[in-house]
Image (tube, helix red, strand yellow):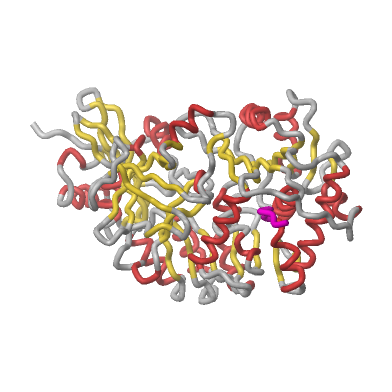
Amino acid sequence: MTTANIAAMLAGNARRFAAEDALVFEGRRWTHAQLDADVNALAAGLLDLDVGQGSRVAIIANNVPEFLILSLALSKIGAVFVPLNYRLTAGELAHLLGHARVQAVATVPEFAALTAAACAALPGVRRFALEPIDAGWTDLGGVISDNAGRRVPDAELGDDALQRIIYTSGTTSLPKGVMLTHGNVNMNMHAQIVELGLRAGDRILNFAPLYHVGGTDLPGYGIWHVGGCMVLQRRFDPAAVLRAIESERITGMVMAATMLDMVRRASESSPADLTSVRWIIYSQVTTALFGVARRLFPNARLIEGYGLTETCSGLTYLDAAHMESKQGSVGIPVPWVQVRVVDASGHDVPAGVDGEVVARGPKVSPGYLDDPEATATAFRDGWFHTGDVGCFDEDGYLYIRDRLKDMIRSGGENMSSAEIENVLSDHPLVLAASVVGAPDPKWQEVPVAFVIGRPGLTPEALVAHARERLGGFKVPKEIYIVEEFPTNPSGKVLKRTLRDLRPSMTPDWTYTPTT
C-alpha cells in the first residue's frame, strides 16, 4: 500500500545517504541516518504519550532542530502540527490554541513563560519542551534518548490528510488557519526540486522562521526529499550568514530584500567566499538591490518569487534566462500549478491589464480551518483568489502590482502603491521603497512614501525623479527616509504598521501647494 505521508522520504534517505549531512545547527550535525533515527524515536515516544493519528500539537519556538524533528515525527504518526508565531501575545496565542483544538504545545525556554500564560485557560493542553525547561514540561530530547533504536511505521495517509494548520498574519482580520495537507506539501517539494534543480549535494541555509512557509517549504523539507542538507540558524544575523555560506559551502537560500543590504554591509567588514551560492529566492527587490545581489553572489540565479501560505509557498519564480531582462517580474508558475489574472467577474484579462491573481493546483490549500465563509470567499469556482493585483506581459510573465487592500483611492482615482514604489525604486540611490495611503480631508487618501536610501539621497531629488515619471496626483505628498521597514517573517513590508507609525513621525519632505 502506498502513502502520501511526507515522512516516508526519511527511511530511503537513511539508506541512500546514511553518512551524509542532513541537518546542521550551531555545531551539531545529523546525518540522514541519525535524522531518521531521531524522528522514529520521537514518534515512538509520542505514541506512548497518547499523541497519535489526528492529534494536534502546537509549536511556539524559534528555529531549533527539535522543531523540525517534532514536525516530522508528528507527520510520521499522522498527527497534525500547528506552528505559531512567538511574537504574538499570550492572549492571541491562547485564542489560536483554542481555535486549533490542540492537545499539546511544545516550546523552548525563551518562550516558556509566554506559552504557559497562553495555556493558562486551557488546562487540558499538555506541555512539551523542545529544549530542557523544568519539571513541569515533558522534555522531548529525553523522549528521543529513551526511545533510541525504536522504529514506527509511517501512518497510511492519503493526499488529503491534514499535515499542518498554519495561521495567516491577520493583517486585515483575525488570523485564519490555513490547512495544508500531505498532498500539498509533497507537491510543493516536487515543484521546488524541479524549479531549483535540487540535488543530493545541495546545502541550503535556513534562517526564515519555521512557523512560516518560508522556513518549512521554500524549499524547506524539499532539500531532504533529494538527500541534501539544511543548515539551520536560530535567527537572521548577517555576519553569521556570511560565515555559514563560506564554511558550509551553501548553495541556496531565501533572503528578504532588506536583508541583502545588511549582508552587503557585513561583508565590507568581514569578507567571505560566497561563490558556492547558485540560487537565492527573494521578493520586492529594487534595481539597486539587484545590483548588490549580483556583486555579492556572482554565480547565483537571482529568483524573484511570489507565493502565499495558502499555496504552500512559491507559486511563481523568475527563470534564470530572464532574471535581468524581466527584472521586476515574479516569473512564471512553478510546475503543477495554474495561474490566471481575472476581472471582477472572473474572466481573464488581456496581457498588460491589471486584475486579481488566482491560482489552482495540488499544492494549493483546500481552505481555512472551521471557517466556511472565508473559505467560500477565497476558494471559489475551483480557484484560490489571492487578493493580489497583477498582470501578465505578452510573454506570459507575471507582475504583481499591489494588494487589493493596498490600492490608494484618491479623488475618485484608484492608484497602485506598487507603481509608485517601482518609480521611486528606479532612483539609483534608493534601496527600497514602500508607499501607503494617508487620510486626506479633500482627496480621501494621498500617497506617502517610506524610503531606505544610500548616503546622499535627498527627498527633494526623489520627488523631482517622481515628477518626471508620474502624474501629479501619484507623486507622494510626504517622504520619510528610514533605516528599515517593519516586516513579517517572510520579509514582506507591514504597510499597516507604517500607516500606524506615520502620525508619530516627522516627514523629511512635505508637499506644499503653490498659490
Q: Is residue 179 left or right of residue 429?
A: right
Quadrant for the N terminus, please. Answer: bottom right
Image location (x, y in percent) of residue 140: 82, 48
Residue 93 is at least partly visible in this image: yes
Looking at the image, which residue is at 68% across and 41% down? 60
Number of marks drawn: 0
In the image, residue 204 above or below residue 117: below
Work out whether residue 240 can be spotted. no
| Residue that sits furthest to the right in the current view | 146
Residue extent of the magenta highlight: 1-6
**Residue 187, quarter of picture:** bottom right
Residue nearest the observer in this picture, 495 or 346: 346
Question: Looking at the picture, does residue 329 appear above or below residue 247?
Answer: above
- In the rendered image, residue 486, in percent from the top left (x then y), is placed at 47, 43
Give the vertical position of 247 relative to 134 (above or below). below
Residue 345: x %, y % from top left: 29, 35
Residue 110 located within the stretch drawn in magenta: no
Q: Residue at x 21, y 37 (%)?
A: 511
Q: Quadrant of the C terminus?
A: top left
